Image: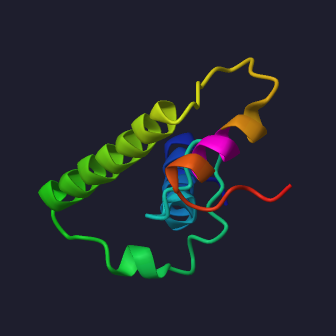
């Protein structure tokens, strides 16, 4: 029994489409925010923060702005207490720990 080349091509095309459709969910991105490195090993287990995440874009934006303002305020406080951020500082751990202690911000990193 012989088949026409058009029929073989249509069967091949149908099988490719079916296999791609079945494999597509395996490549779908999760909402875990794995980032470009693909580090979403904990994406299957939602954290408490993701469960309590706000539902609207405006709420998420407001929370990001609030967190950014808090971090900027902390950095300004550290700078006012002697911390000078630079990428080539040989005394990095010590000088930020001193500034944190002086400003009363958080716990100094363990030695």
Residue 11 in magenta? no
Q: Magenta stretch?
A: 96-100
Question: Foreground: 6 or 46?
Answer: 46
Q: Is residue 38 above or below residue 90?
A: below
Residue drawn at x 57%, y 77% is 44
Residue 9 appears at what percent x and percent y?
54, 45
Question: Foreground: 2 or 31?
Answer: 31
> In terms of secondary structure, what is the magenta stretch mainly?
helix
Q: Residue furthest right?
A: 111
Residue drawn at x 48%, y 64% is 30
Residue drawn at x 56%, y 60% is 106
Question: Foreground: 26 or 17?
Answer: 26
Q: Is residue 54 left or right of residue 84?
A: left
Q: Is residue 36 above or below residue 109?
A: above
Q: In the rendered view of the protein, which quadrant contains the C terminus?
A: bottom right
Residue 6 appears at what percent x and percent y?
50, 42
Q: How many marks?
A: 0
Residue 99 in magenta? yes
Residue 8 appears at what percent x and percent y?
58, 49
Q: In the rendered view of the protein, which quadrant contains the N terminus?
A: bottom right
Residue drawn at x 56%, y 58% is 27
Residue 88 appears at what percent x and percent y?
74, 17
């Amino acid at each position: 029994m012989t088949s026409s080349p058009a029929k073989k091509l249509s069967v091949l095309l149908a099988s490719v489409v079916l296999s791609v459709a079945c494999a597509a969910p395996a490549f779908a991105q999760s909402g875990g925010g794995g980032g470009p490195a693909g580090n979403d090993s904990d994406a299957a287990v939602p954290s408490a923060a993701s469960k309590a995440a706000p539902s609207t874009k405006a709420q998420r934006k407001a929370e990001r702005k609030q967190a950014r303002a808090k971090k900027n305020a902390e950095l300004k406080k550290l700078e006012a207490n002697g911390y000078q951020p630079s990428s080539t500082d040989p005394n990095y751990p010590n000088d930020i720990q001193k500034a944190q202690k002086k400003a009363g911000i958080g716990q100094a990193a363990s030695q």
